[in-house]
Image (tube, rainbow, N blue to C red):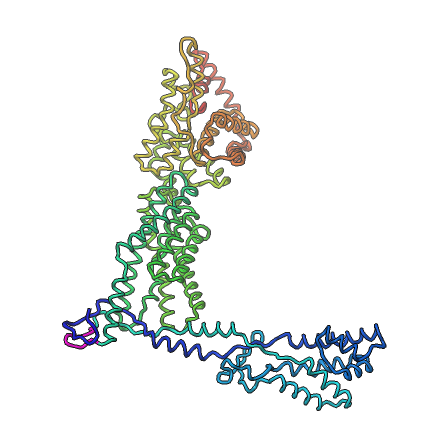
């Protein structure tokens, strides 16, 4: 490297921009700031009350001694006061006080005289003012008040005594009383201010630290020394500083590795939280979505920084600062997505991580972290409480909650920083905060369908679309399997109301109830609700084959769900809505038909393939499906009969282990049973009779005619319908 006095053989140009501190100038300013702080003295706030208390104690003690020993001598009393109170007075003074019996009016007069003197600044001697008081004065602190006074304004103790004597001489009192006061009063006089070394040093340190470093900037591209010039000490210093700065800059690979380790730790703890808070089927989707969203946020913030820097440097008509444009960044688009698609807990976790990311990219700005964090919480609140669950809630939350709230945050930040001087910057930040709120909502609105599809999230909007009665699958069910369609509507209604009461997902339950039996569309005629009276295809089948036909509607339903591209959670409800329960009707029929010694009838051969319900929503559909089918068999659906059916169905599934994995508590089951009962009774409750009609007699005639046909043909259609109702029996 070139040395001082050498001639440069080439131009040396700074490859970086460097701010260099002028250490000597900075130290000089610090010393000046420290030197300007005057010594601090504290005024003793209790000095007047202490003096009054001491005077009171002096007179009370004297009166007490006289009361106990009226013949006490002045010498004895002088000795007593010297030993006990530390007050040394001439015996003649005590003789006068004994003669006057320590009068209360003298006590009060002494306190009144001392009070105005003690309220002034008194020191023992000016010779003790060795901390620069003569030049700088004294900073007197009285409680919350501070006052700077000159050294000449402070009273020495002897000056205070002279002032006290002067004040006593001016009083209109008897000579003896004045003389007595002139001796007594100085005994209770003491310094009122004390030098505080610690406070003085602290204030000088604060003044020193408050001085901003004196610095100058070496611009990138600046010629440090030209070819042929002689190197000076200042030139060499600049070259050394530039080389040190370049060598101290971390390599991007090290920085990248550090970030990877940091975010690995963050994602580890995030995964632990998701693992305990999220649904089993959503855990990986949530983690994957969080990673993708944070990556997109990183790219969006980087792009926004680039745009802000470009605007700052390119616009000449309007002055825009990069820091002011920061508030226009779409900080909350990821929070919108999580608040729309996942739980509040997961949304809050994402908001915290996203706020840390935003603050990191903006050089650890604490206020950016606060701005992003509180803005995210406002989004979560708006999406969960204030606005409906449709996709339009993204825009509504952006306009009605986030944008105005971010304006409030900007104003709060300026209040904290006390920076209202730059009106142009404040206006830009307010406009930016409005833009950022609207931009975040717009980006989330555009991305939400892609995220729903990519990560399999089931939003309320999607569920509302899936439960639309105009969908082709429902029209097909209404035409080809009307009984199944009607059954599905009732199951959906039963389960949805119960879901609301146990805090499950009512929209998901409604969708599951409508779709749970779509597999019956493949062979609708094999299910009793779609059969005409007297027409039973199971009559020609063996019990095992009938069981296979019945249980296959679950597999067929799953296949149809995949073709319809139904969400996975609805598909799982279809798969689990019978669990591994037994098709009881055909199991009993097989036991009746076959000789147990020749045919071994196993209950496992007559079960649905399962699995058992893995969520409360799937468990609700299982219970609602079974209860609805069972109540159809009641000839008299009274409230008591309905209650008995519900209890028996619930007990049967509990004993069979069908509800072991869906997370129901006994309280949940009781709430569900009461909900089912109220809904079913509302459906089946008796109606008032129609005037002029007698429907029951007509029905009796029909039954008699049917009975006659049955006897004529030798076949009981009604009995067959009741016996071969496999769906009702299961």
- Residue 45 found in image quarter: bottom right
Looking at the rendered structure, the number of numbered marks drawn on it comes to: 0
Rendering coords of residue 272 (x, y %): 40, 44
Compared to 330, does 529 lie above or below? above
Q: Nearer the viewer, residue 382 or 660?
A: 660
Q: Residue at x 55, y 87 (%)?
A: 152
Q: Residue at x 33, y 59 (%)?
A: 361
Q: Nearer the viewer, residue 680 or 703?
A: 680
Q: Residue at x 48, y 29 (%)?
A: 627
Q: Main secondary structure of the magenta part?
A: loop
| In-image side of 85 versus 595 (left or right) | right
Rendering coords of residue 161 (x, y %): 66, 86
Compared to 407, does 55 lie above or below? below
Compared to 690, does 441 lie above or below? below
- Does the magenta-highlighted stretch encompass residue 591? no
Q: Quadrant of the C terminus?
A: top left
Q: Nearer the viewer, residue 243 or 289?
A: 243
Question: Which segment is the magenta one?
Answer: 223-231
């Amino acid at each position: 490297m070139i040395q001082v006095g050498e001639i440069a053989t080439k131009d040396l140009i700074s490859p970086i921009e460097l701010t260099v501190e002028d250490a000597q100038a900075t130290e000089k300013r610090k010393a000046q700031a420290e030197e300007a702080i005057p010594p601090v003295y504290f005024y003793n706030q209790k000095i007047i009350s202490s003096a009054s208390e001491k005077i009171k104690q002096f007179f009370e003690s004297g009166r007490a001694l006289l009361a106990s020993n009226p013949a006490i001598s002045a010498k004895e009393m002088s000795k007593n006061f010297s030993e006990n109170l530390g007050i040394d007075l001439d015996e003649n003074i005590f003789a006068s006080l004994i003669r006057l019996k320590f009068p209360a009016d003298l006590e009060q007069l002494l306190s009144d005289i001392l009070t105005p003197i003690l309220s002034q600044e008194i020191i023992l001697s000016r010779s003790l003012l060795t901390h620069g008081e003569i030049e700088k004065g004294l900073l007197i602190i009285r409680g919350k008040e501070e006052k700077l006074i000159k050294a000449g304004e402070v009273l020495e103790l002897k000056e205070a005594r002279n002032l006290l004597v002067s004040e006593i001489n001016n009083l209109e009192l008897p000579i003896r009383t004045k003389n007595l006061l002139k001796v007594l009063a100085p005994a209770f006089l003491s310094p009122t201010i004390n030098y505080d070394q610690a406070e003085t040093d602290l204030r000088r340190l604060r003044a020193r630290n408050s001085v901003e470093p004196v610095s100058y900037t070496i611009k990138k591209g600046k010629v440090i020394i030209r070819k042929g010039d002689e190197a000076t000490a200042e030139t060499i210093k600049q070259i050394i500083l530039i080389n040190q700065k370049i060598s101290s800059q971390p390599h991007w690979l090290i920085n990248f590795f550090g970030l990877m380790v940091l975010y690995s730790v963050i994602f580890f703890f995030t995964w632990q939280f998701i693992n305990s808070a999220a649904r089993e089927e959503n855990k990986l989707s949530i983690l994957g979505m969080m990673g993708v969203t944070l990556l997109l946020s990183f790219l969006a913030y980087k792009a926004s920084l680039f745009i802000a820097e470009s605007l700052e440097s390119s616009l000449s008509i309007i002055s825009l600062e990069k820091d002011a444009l920061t508030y226009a960044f779409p900080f909350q688009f990821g929070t919108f997505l999580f608040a729309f698609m996942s739980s509040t807990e997961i949304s809050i976790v994402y908001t915290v991580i996203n706020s840390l990311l935003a603050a990191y990219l903006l050089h650890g700005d604490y206020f950016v972290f606060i701005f992003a964090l509180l803005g995210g919480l406002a989004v979560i609140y708006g999406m969960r409480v204030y606005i409906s669950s449709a996709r339009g809630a993204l825009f509504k939350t952006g306009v009605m909650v986030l944008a105005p709230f971010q304006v409030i945050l900007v104003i709060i930040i300026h209040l904290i920083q006390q920076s209202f001087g730059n009106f142009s910057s404040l206006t830009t930040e307010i406009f930016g905060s409005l833009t950022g709120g609207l931009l975040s909502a717009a980006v989330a609105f555009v991305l939400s369908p892609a995220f729903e599809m990519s990560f399999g999230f089931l939003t309320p909007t999607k569920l509302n679309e899936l439960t639309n009665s105009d969908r082709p699958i429902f029209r097909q069910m209404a035409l080809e399997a009307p009984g199944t369609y009607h059954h599905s509507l009732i199951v959906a209604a039963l389960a949805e109301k119960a879901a609301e009461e146990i805090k499950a997902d009512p929209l998901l339950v409604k969708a599951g109830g409508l779709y749970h039996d779509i597999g019956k569309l493949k062979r609708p005629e094999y299910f009793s609700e779609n059969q005409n009276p007297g027409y039973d295809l199971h009559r020609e089948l063996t019990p095992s084959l009938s069981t296979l036909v019945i249980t296959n509607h679950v597999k067929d339903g799953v296949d149809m769900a995949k073709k319809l591209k139904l969400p996975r959670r609805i598909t799982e409800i279809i798969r689990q809505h019978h669990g591994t329960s037994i098709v009881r009707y055909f199991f009993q029929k097989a036991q009746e038909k076959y000789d147990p010694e020749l045919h071994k009838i196993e209950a496992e051969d007559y079960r649905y393939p399962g699995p058992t319900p893995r969520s409360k929503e799937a468990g609700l559909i299982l219970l609602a499906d079974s209860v609805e089918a069972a109540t159809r068999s009641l000839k008299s659906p009274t409230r008591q009969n309905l209650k008995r059916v519900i209890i028996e169905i619930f007990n049967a599934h509990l004993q069979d282990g069908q509800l072991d994995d869906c997370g129901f508590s006994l309280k949940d089951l009781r709430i569900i049973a009461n909900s089912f009962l109220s809904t079913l009774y509302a459906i089946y409750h008796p109606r008032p009779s129609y005037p002029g009609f007698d429907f029951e007699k007509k029905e009796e005639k029909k039954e008699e005619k049917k009975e006659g046909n049955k006897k004529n043909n030798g076949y009981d259609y009604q009995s067959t319908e009741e016996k071969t109702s496999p769906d009702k029996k299961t």
